Image (spheres, rainbow, N blue to C red):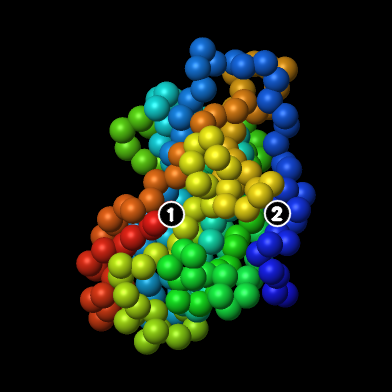
């Protein structure tokens, strides 16, 4: 299914409202949680491209409750497949929705083709041994998997352009579309009366991440760029 991006805001705002609305502020100040893609790996035989989704908090020991994962990708190079390999007791609430824009929709992000958008929800399913975030290191919670249909186009792509863009203009600005909240993250609320508590979301882009490649490919070992 193809969409005109001017009509997507209502769709995004209606999807995956999975988290209990936060109650009174349970922290002295909002924790700051960063999210990034990391450790890109491409398997030539299967045409599979995988990236870890990692988190970091300025308050050590924070436990995440849920995340609305929203990002855009270059549909000319990649096709989103799934979230998998979850840490702890996290998992998808439902199959992520894939929204495909018109051919020209990716130009604003520097994509070679149309922009695909992933809108999914990952949440803590049960609380046993918690996965605690760190303030200095990154913690991987799951992996995003893509299919590469045209390896030659993928491997020869200009590495100055992005493959993936988080749907968040800024910590206080929401997503790129009117009415779109973008990436939304909540923490486990220390209060027994509530499941979740708000945090301040920051997406980490323009990151240089060395690629781990299982084949002859050299292009991905130089830089891995994310740009908003």
Crowd rating for badge 1 (residues with CA inside 10 Å; few <14, some 14–19, many 20+): some
Q: Is residue 89 visible?
A: no
Give me the residue at 35% from left, 78% from top: 157
Q: Which residue is mark 2?
A: 9
Q: Residue at x 49, y 41 (%)?
A: 170
Q: In percent of the image, x 52 and y 70: which residue is there?
A: 106
* Residue 120 picture quarter: bottom right
Judge from the rendering whether residue 22 lies leftward or rightward of residue 50; answer left or right.
Answer: right
Q: Mark 2 vs mark 1: which is more N-terminal?
A: 2
Q: Nearer the viewer, residue 219 or 217?
A: 219
Left or right position of 19 against 53: right
Above or below, 158 against 15 in this view is below
Check disc 1 and report its element: helix, strand or loop: loop
Classify the position of the C terminus by image quarter: bottom left
Seen in the picture, residue 200 relative to 213 is either above or below; the reply is: above
Give me the residue at 70% from left, 36% from top.
19
Q: Position of residue 114 (x, y in %)?
A: 55, 74
Task: Work out whether residue 225 or residue 151 is closer to the camera in this orientation and state it.
Answer: 225
Give the answer, above or below, for where 108 lies relative to 132: below
Q: Could you say whether the residue bearing mark 2 is in a helix, strand or loop?
A: helix
Marker count (numbered)? 2
Residue 10 showing in the rendered view: yes
Between the residue at mark 2 and the residue at mark 1, the CA separation in whole angstroms equals 18 Å
**94 left or right of 105 in image:** right
Q: Residues within 10 Å of mark 2 (few under 14, many from 20)?
A: some
Q: Quadrant of the N terminus?
A: bottom right
List x then y, in percent, for residue 183. 57, 45
Find residue 12 and report its horizontal and vertical position in percent.
Answer: 70, 53
Residue labelled with disc 1: 228
Residue 163 picture quarter: bottom left
Q: Is residue 66 above or below residue 177?
A: above
Q: Position of residue 102 (x, y in %)?
A: 62, 75
């Amino acid at each position: 299914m193809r969409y005109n991006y001017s009509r997507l805001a209502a769709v995004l705002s209606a999807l995956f409202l999975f988290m209990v609305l936060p109650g009174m502020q349970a922290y002295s100040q909002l924790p700051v949680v960063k999210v990034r893609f990391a450790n890109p790996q491409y398997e030539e035989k299967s045409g599979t491209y995988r990236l870890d989704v990692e988190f970091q908090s300025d308050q050590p020991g924070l436990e995440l409750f849920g995340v609305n994962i929203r990002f855009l990708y270059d549909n000319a190079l990649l096709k989103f497949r799934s979230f998998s390999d979850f840490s702890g007791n996290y998992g998808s609430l439902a199959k992520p929705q894939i929204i495909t824009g018109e051919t020209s929709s990716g130009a604003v992000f520097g994509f070679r083709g149309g922009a695909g958008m992933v809108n999914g929800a990952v949440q803590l399913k049960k609380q046993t041994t918690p996965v605690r975030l760190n303030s200095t290191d990154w913690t991987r919670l799951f992996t995003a998997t893509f299919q590469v249909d045209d390896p030659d186009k993928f491997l020869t792509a200009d590495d100055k352009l992005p493959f993936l863009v988080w749907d968040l203009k800024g910590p206080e600005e929401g997503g790129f579309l009117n009415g779109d909240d973008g990436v939304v993250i909540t923490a486990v609320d220390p209060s027994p009366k509530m499941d979740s508590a708000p945090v301040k979301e920051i997406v980490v882009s323009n990151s240089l991440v060395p690629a781990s490649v299982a084949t002859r490919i050299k292009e991905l070992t130089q830089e891995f760029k994310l740009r908003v």
